[in-house]
Image (tube, helix red, strand yellow):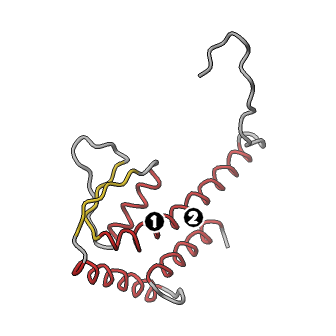
Amino acid sequence: MSGEALLREKLRKIEALFAGAGTVGEKLAAEAALERVRAKLAEITKSDPLIETQFSLGDQWSRKLFLALCRRYGLQPYRLHRQRYTTVMLKAPSKFISEILWPEFQELDSALRHYLNDVTTRIIREEVHKDTGEAAEMTAPKGLPKS
């Protein structure tokens, strides 16, 4: 199984975990899991008021993932005028954010980052230079300002 296929399978398993499913099946099982999360969101919304929450996402990959995850659950992320590109605003129940959305995002984001790091390192090692380690740390010569 390719690295991308493994990532896709891992993402499906993470989604199933947060949806409360015991197993991961084909498309019907994935849709059922998604519907369970949407139903849970609707249930939480009845007792937990919507709050506006600001998220600061450090890079474009995390931001794209977070936006897609919100939209998957029928939520509408947005930015206020003049907010940074990495800022995402969301109106959703606090309980849904803290118990489902944010933990699921963190798991998915971690899996995606790990995959992107592995692919990037492999391509650099194969196409640019085999040493992909960090730069050596040196002490600054005397007389130079420290930054």
When the figure is inspected, residue 90 is found, relative to residue 15, above or below; the finding is: above
Q: Amino acid at mark 2?
A: Ala
Which of these two is toward me, 32 or 145? 145
Q: Is residue 145 left or right of residue 66?
A: right
Q: Nearer the viewer, mark 2 or mark 1?
A: 1
- Quick one: label 2, few (<14), some, or many (20+) residues within 10 Å? some
- Tell me which corner region of the image, top left, top right, bottom left or bottom right, holds residue 53: bottom left
Instruction: Provide residue 18's location: percent of width, then percent of height.
Output: 46, 78
Element class at badge 1: helix
| Cα distance in 3D space between marks 2 and 1 | 10 Å
The C terminus lies in quadrant: top right
- Quick one: label 1, few (<14), some, or many (20+) residues within 10 Å? many
Residue at 29% of width from left, 56% of height from top?
89
Residue matched to label 1 = 105
Residue at 66% of width from left, 69% of height from top?
2
Q: Residue furthest top?
A: 143
Residue matched to label 2 = 111
Q: Residue furthest right?
A: 130
